[in-house]
Image (tube, rainbow, N blue to C red):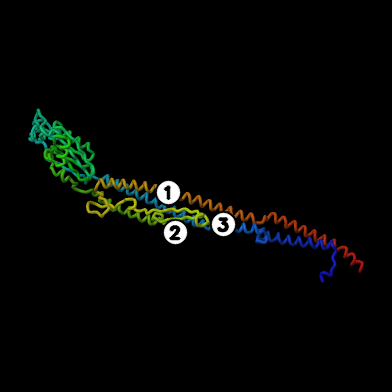
Amino acid sequence: MANDITLSSSIRSSLLSLQDTASLQATTQNHLSTGKKVASALDNPINFFTAASLNDRSSALSGLLDGISNGIQTIQAASKGIDGITKLVQSLQSTITQAQNDAAANRPTKTGTALSIAAEAVATNKGLKDVTLNKKLGGADTTADQATSTSSGDIGIDTSTNNTLALTINAGPTTFTTTFTGTQTVQDLVNAVNASGIATASVDDSGKLTVKGTGSNTLKVGFGSGASAAAATTNAQTGALNTNLGLAATDYTTGVTASGNSTVRANLVKQFNDLTTQLDQLSRDSGYNGKNLLGGDLLTIVFNEKTGANQTKLDVQGTTLTSASLGINQAFNGTGGPAGSFDIQDDTSLTTTKDTLTNALTSLRSLASTFGSSLSTVQTRQGFTKQIANVLTTGADNLTNADLNFEAANYTALQTRQSIAQQTLGLANQANQGVLQLLR
């Protein structure tokens, strides 16, 4: 039996030292092989469970990084969509500008009858154009007085009683009105029309007055007289004295329309409508992973591992971005287009559409700025999440990881200690060996 064996105290002391050294060597070898100084709750319960909690949170945050990354890509996809739509809107602007630059074929124009005759040209030794321009608007009676070598003549308007004359021009939403006295001339009337901004006037070599709209809207031209400016304007709106200018009363009551349309504008209809279709399709294609911020979707990006009121997140509300939502209507050529469309031959419609496109660009820039702000926030949180996850993992490692340099030094020291203990045990056994020699 082991208890029947008697060992000296020195031998027992050496054996205990060897056993302690072997135990420490085993512990150190475990630290070196696992890299952990706390591998289980038995090693250090406080450090073990604290590190486990830190690692769990780090893993949860790292798991959220995929969702954050998807959120960034979704916002970037929408931003790229806005860039593309902006270019399409700019192309639409160019199309409208091209249409506006071709307008010669659809300007309402009215040329009246001659206001002078050949005999007046002979009497004044002037051309019919100059004779007509020099004629007075008013006179003593309703008989047109011919120009002579000593008189400029008039166009036959009696201003002895109704001594105020008025010209009214209307084109679309704009109306221009001005008054004259009987002593003013046809030249004064031409100058007034040219100053209106909505029409131009001229007298040709045959003595005929021509009035032409500066836009494509129906042009209304009326001339009248009265005892006051208000009365004269009222009469002008019936075209009461239009015949004295070689025009017709219906040139105001009905108006003058363009005799033809612009072929260039007509050819631009398909180009404009194709661009609006591409705008809508590009918007639909701006999604990522099932989310499209340009389709009105809501994107929710979660930043921490908590729930309820303690959860931090960012909601990015998308908007439905289409040609209709931007107020951009389809174009058509002439009359009878579908509801909500605009006539590409009409100058007012072109101006309105161009203003709409300018406003659309402003809206797109504002939306791009909003998404840009959200993107910056998400990217900041992405970087923060990566850093905090690293901090948590490092903290957990500090609590449980072994210092391999320290453990290696320990192991070397323990090997030295073990060797010394073995030699000490040998010395302790020398006394017993002496007794053995005596017995021999």
Disc nearer the start of the sequence (3/2): 3
Q: Would residue 329 appear left or right of 385 to someone viewing this image?
A: left
Q: Which of the two discs, 3 and 2, sits closer to the camera?
A: 3
Q: What residue would you read off at disc 3? A: 57
For image coordinates 80% across by 60% down, the residue present is: 421
Q: Identify which amino acid the numbered label 2 is placed on.
A: Asn
Disc nearer the start of the sequence (2/1): 2
SS type, badge 1:
helix
Instruction: Answer few, some or many: residues within 10 Å of disc 1's Cα (few below 14, many 20 plus, some between 14 and 19).
Output: some
Q: What residue would you read off at disc 1? A: 370
The numbered dot on residue 289 is 2
Q: Would residue 197 appear left or right of 251 to someone viewing this image?
A: right
Instruction: Answer few, some or many: residues within 10 Å of disc 2's Cα (few below 14, many 20 plus, some between 14 and 19).
Output: few
Q: Would residue 352 appear left or right of 8 to someone viewing this image?
A: left
| Residue 226 position within the rendered picture, expressed as x and y whole percent measured from the top left | 13, 36
| Residue 339 position within the rendered picture, expressed as x and y whole percent measured from the top left | 26, 54
| Rendered image quadrant of residue 174 | top left
Whether residue 273 is visible here, answered yes or no, is yes
Instruction: Answer few, some or many: residues within 10 Å of disc 3's Cα (few below 14, many 20 plus, some between 14 and 19).
Output: some
Q: Identify which amino acid the numbered label 1 is placed on.
A: Thr
Q: Identify which amino acid the numbered label 3 is placed on.
A: Arg
